[in-house]
Amino acid sequence: MRYGLVPPIVHRNPRFTPPRWEFEAEIDDLAFVARAADELGYDFMCFPGHVAIPEEVGEVRGLVYWDPVATMSYVAARTSRIKLCAYIVVLGYYHPLQIAKSYGTVDRLSNGRLILGVGVGSLKQEFELLGASFDDRGPRGDDALRAIRASLSKRMPVYHGEYYDYEGFVVDPHAVQEHVPIWIGGRTRRSLRRALELADGWSPFKLSIDELRPMLEAWRDEIAERPAFDLIFPPDPPVDPSANPDGTLAVLDDHRALGATGLALRFVHRSREHYLEQLEAFAKLTTR
């Protein structure tokens, strides 16, 4: 399995009770975490993204989301091998070429380490704030996905679709990877079908193993036909490898049995130093 992080600082999710140090953290703390994860062999780091969160939903979604393009670019300059995953970009908020340009530049700055996580979104108030269409976000997102795949690694992309139609425009810089991995976020069977049809992986959120199992079973044959297809799951609640190694290994075993190819991890932690201890403890567990 591949092991990645949803790092502290960049997103404070109230469901996981962020510790006090995250509220006081400096930019150097993020660099410290990123370099440690890079050196310890973690495969990827995930950077959640929203433009603006309605205050009334803050207790559910959290209110702190660092801009992923700026943050990923900063982390790219301070690491050498760990992949950088946008987690996720809401397709309806942006034109496909805006996504291709912004995240293609991240891929260039990181020497080809981008993973592009995308989804159709569900926060209606944010759609309305941005003047984005909510009711047709599904088919519009599917068309955007096709456009992004046709454009990410091209200097002069060409696409003619139902919602997006362009040619004769230069996008430079663009992604340096010939094929940027695209993961679909979400928590519905439709998001899994979208991933199987149009992307390279599925990374759902807020779904228990008992909820995931029947969804995966429903698409068992289609998943089997895609041996390189990624299933990246975020264990919930956060794991505690230093204090509870057996429990952490049980979480890994449960997700492996489900067919996971990777985990997007959060750790129980009290301070920057404790977070480093957790990074090291988990790395040791997985190299036994």
Image (tube, rainbow, N blue to C red):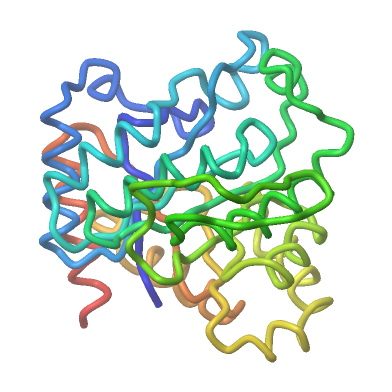
Q: Residue at x 71, y 65 (%)?
A: 212
Is the N terminus in the top left, top right, bottom left or bottom right quadrant? Answer: bottom left
Left or right position of 13 against 194: left
- Residue 175: x and y, percent? 37, 57
Question: Number of numbered discs present?
Answer: 0
Residue that sits furthest to the right in the current view = 135
Q: Is residue 20 above or below residue 189?
A: above
Q: Is residue 55 above or below residue 140?
A: above
Location of residue 124 by image quarter:
top right
Q: Toward the viewer: 170 or 181? A: 170
Q: Residue at x 24, y 72 (%)?
A: 285
Is the C terminus in the top left, top right, bottom left or bottom right quadrant? Answer: bottom left
Q: Residue at x 23, y 23 (%)?
A: 21
Location of residue 275 by image quarter:
top left
Q: Residue at x 82, y 30 (%)?
A: 134
Left or right position of 9 against 85: left
- Residue 47: x and y, percent? 40, 41
Residue that sits furthest to the top in the current view = 55
- Residue 282: x and y, percent? 25, 63
- Residue 247: x and y, percent? 40, 64
